[in-house]
Image: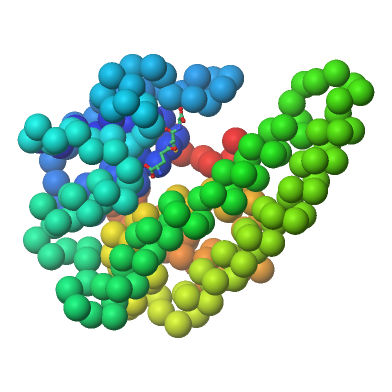
Amino acid sequence: MITVHHLNNSRSQRILWLLEELGLPYEIKRYTRDPVTQLAPPELRAVHPLGKSPVITDDGNTLAESGAIIEYIVGRYGDGRLVPAAGTTERLAYTYWLHFAEGSAMPPLLMKLVFDKVENAPMPFFVKPIARAISKNVNSILITPNLQRNLAFMEGTLEKSEWFAGAQFTAADIQMSFPLEAARGRAGLDEGRPRLMRFLERIHARPAYQRALAQGGPFSLTF
Ligand SMILES: N[C@@H](CCC(=O)N[C@@H](CS)C(=O)NCC(=O)O)C(=O)O
């Protein structure tokens, strides 16, 4: 049986959702973020040296990295579900978006989170203007342009097809959900990108998404 090492309000929510979509049995071992730092507790490092979520254990295997976990579950237990057939253009798109989510979409979102925290962190009054100026610069030169380009690119993709890898819902959509939830929660994704907003509505309406929420606990990427 697959064990999902689940950190509350985190990327492991995607793995619960995938398992619910596939109707596979699993058990959850729960970990709670530090309420101040939001970091994972040290117990997660006993499962995998990096101590990040998600991690799964299954049949003697310990796997980290959402994309690798998704490939493992879909490849081993999916019976061809949630992945386009090999050799198709949809499969190429599937692989691309599976990697894009963590490789390209998440870095500017994470940078935004960090620099927003720097700007609002308690610090001596004479340091604040310097911290604000650095954060403003990084935001305007690096973070915002990359975020906006990524959002425009994703919006453009969903103008051409209903899901990221074509007409069918796939595990790449599950992987793409996290950066889009994060962009909605803390990086200004709004009705200016209607296709991305409809994507979020469609995934939220899926019964398996709802079942995964009930299993995983409150999920809100606004911090
Ligand atoms: N690229 C990795 C990122 C893993 C990651 O950063 N997970 C976050 C949760 S969303 C985490 O464990 N944060 C707590 C910490 O860094 O201590 C993946 O997709 O699995």
Q: Quadrant of the N terminus?
A: top left
In the picture provided, is 40 more to the left or to the right than 24? right
Does residue 64 sit above or below 189 in this rendering?
above
Q: Residue at x 23, y 38 (%)?
A: 63
Residue 118 lies, in percent from the top left, at: 72, 32
Residue 90: image quadrant is bottom left
Asked whether, in this view, residue 171 is left or right of residue 125, the answer is left
State how the image is colored.
rainbow
Q: Nearer the viewer, residue 15 or 76?
A: 76
Picture coordinates of residue 79, whole percent (x, y):
9, 61
Camera-nearest residue between 65 and 192:
65
Q: Quadrant of ligand 1?
A: top left
Q: Position of residue 133 (x, y in %)?
A: 85, 41
Name the quadrant of the C terminus: top right
Q: Quadrant of residue 81?
A: bottom left
For residue 200, above or below residue 66: below
Residue beneath the point at 70% across and 39% down: 116
Q: What is the number of callouts on the image? A: 0
Q: Is residue 46 above or below residue 192?
A: above
Residue at 51% from the left image edge and 56% from the top image edge? 105
Q: Check the image and report above or below for 156 versus 174.
A: below
Q: Which quadrant would residue 215 be assigned to in this image? A: top left
Q: Is residue 100 visible?
A: yes
> How far across and how far down the image is residue 128, in percent?
86, 28
Residue at the right extreme, as displayed: 126
At x 40%, y 75%, the residue is 162
Towards the viewer: 34 or 135: 135
The answer to whether residue 185 shows anywhere in this view is no
